[in-house]
Image: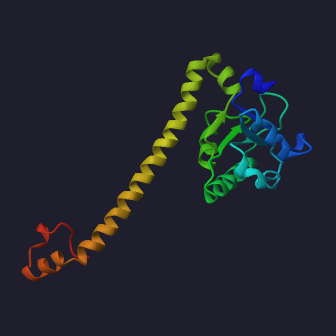
Amino acid sequence: DFADAGADIITFHPEATPDTSETIKLIKGFNKKVGISLKPKSDINLIEKYLDKIDLILIMSVEPGFAGQKFIPDVLPKLKNLKEIIKKKNLKIDLEIDGGINFENCKTAIEAGANVLVSGSTIFKRNNGDLKKNISLLRSNWTMMSLKTAYYYILAVKINFLKIFKKIYFTSSFYKKTLITKIPNQFLFFPNP
């Protein structure tokens, strides 16, 4: 039914099927992406052997059932562990988090590894239900995290480049010639180490 309705990704709980592998095959048979959802108390080992067959992992940060529940921060280590496993295995799997996501905790969810956020009550109820404003606020928090990550990445690249350049420069024949000709320090590109 979901495939016929136009869903691109079909997500299921491994506890809800007698055969996770068969459910994955069934969904893939409809040319759809496969997601597996883990409840707050569900263990990673329920899905670990299927990671190379799925496209998305949904971490529930509330117990499934009804809207408006408070975020359960105990799921963040699970999210972080999955992010590390996915990176280590060089897989392309989206990490989605759903349940109690708001303007404050979305940052910690992103830091833990989520790249897809699901937020219902915050979007529909905060700021008198101003959807445009609420979505914009969530996105701005997401953008700030992305910019912060990009800044630290660029900074790390720059620092490593300078370390390598200094090493090459100070071991080069050009540097040795500058020592022989005794050029004053203010004219050297880098001062002596």
Classify 177 as above or below 73. below
Q: Is residue 186 visible?
A: yes
Q: Quadrant of residue 156?
A: bottom left
Q: Residue furthest bottom?
A: 180
Q: Quadrant of residue 32?
A: top right
Classify 166 as above or below 144. below
Please name whichever residue, 9 or 40, is drawn nearer the observer in this view of the structure: 9
Q: Residue furthest front?
A: 29
List x then y, in percent, for residue 68.
77, 28
The answer to whether residue 57 is left or right of residue 13 is left
Residue plotted at (85% across, 43% down):
22
Residue plotted at (65% across, 17% down):
129
Residue plotted at (75% across, 21% down):
5
The answer to whether residue 148 is left or right of residue 45 is left
List x then y, in percent, for residue 27.
78, 36
Classify 60 as above or below 76. above
List x then y, in percent, for residue 75.
74, 48
Residue plotted at (31% across, 64% down):
162
User: Quarter holding the C terminus?
Assistant: bottom left
Q: Is residue 60 visible?
A: no
Please name whichever residue, 177 or 88, is drawn nearer the observer in this view of the structure: 88
List x then y, in percent, for residue 187.
11, 67
